[in-house]
Image (cartoon, rainbow, N blue to C red):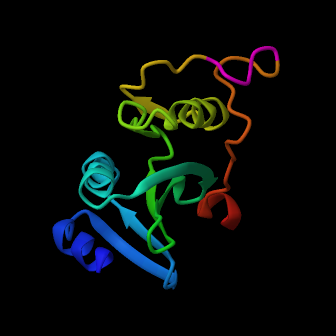
Amino acid sequence: MVLNELQKTFAKEILDSEARSERRVTLRIDPAALIPISVHLFRELGFRFIIASALHTKKGFEIYYHYSYDSTGLVLNLHVILDQKKPEIESLSNMFEATNWIEREMHELFGINFLNHPNLEQLLSEGNWATGEYPYRKTFKSNEDVQA
């Protein structure tokens, strides 16, 4: 099975897994492993990149990269959690043209830096909010603030 092969090949890089059903699986991975795992999914196993989505939680900036194994209907999500203070990850846009705009959008909305992206220019924000403001970033109370 594809998932067993992935877990053997990337045992150290896969931090956790969750099967919501036989056709929907999420692998939480080390952010540094995004490129090698994506290359393996696409070139070796025949997965297709669908889209990526992001959210800001108390854990950090979370990105889900959604892939499809069309012959079986399996949707595989690679889940990364990026640092609160310096959210950055290698861009997939040099491998998948389809990630170009979604990475630009996440950069503008969350302030996530996509390393080696060919063009992180504004996509949405011109005139809507100031440069350096990220409207989807949240402010979380720390445990110390709650106890005070």
Q: In percent of the image, x 28 and y 55: which residue is there?
A: 37
Q: Is 110 located above or below residue 40 in the figure?
A: above
- Considering every residue shown, the one lying at the far front of the view is 71
Figure quadrant of residue 135? top right
- Considering every residue shown, the one lying at the far right of the view is 128
Q: Is 133 located above or below residue 90 in the figure?
A: above
**Along the line of sight, the residue nearer the viewer: 11 or 144:** 11
**Along the line of sight, the residue nearer the viewer: 84 or 99:** 99
Could you say where residue 89 lies in the image, as x and y percent from the top left?
39, 40
Q: In percent of the image, x 58 and y 31: which residue is there?
A: 101
Q: The N terminus appears in which quarter of the rendering? A: bottom left
* Horizontal relation, residue 44 to residue 72: left or right: left
* Horizontal relation, residue 8 to residue 97: left or right: left
- Magenta region's main secondary structure? loop
Q: Is residue 126 magenta?
A: yes
Could you say where residue 93 lies in the image, as x and y percent from the top left?
43, 32
Could you say where residue 132 lies in the image, as x and y percent from the top left?
64, 22
Could you say where residue 80 lies in the image, as x and y percent from the top left?
43, 56
Figure quadrant of residue 117? top left
Q: In percent of the image, x 69 and y 26: which residue is there?
A: 133
* Horizontal relation, residue 5 to residue 102: left or right: left
Q: Is residue 83 magenta?
A: no
The segment highlighted magenta reads 122-127
Q: In percent of the image, x 81 and y 14: which residue is there?
A: 127
Please give the count of numbered marks on the rendered protein.
0
Q: The C terminus appears in which quarter of the rendering? A: bottom right
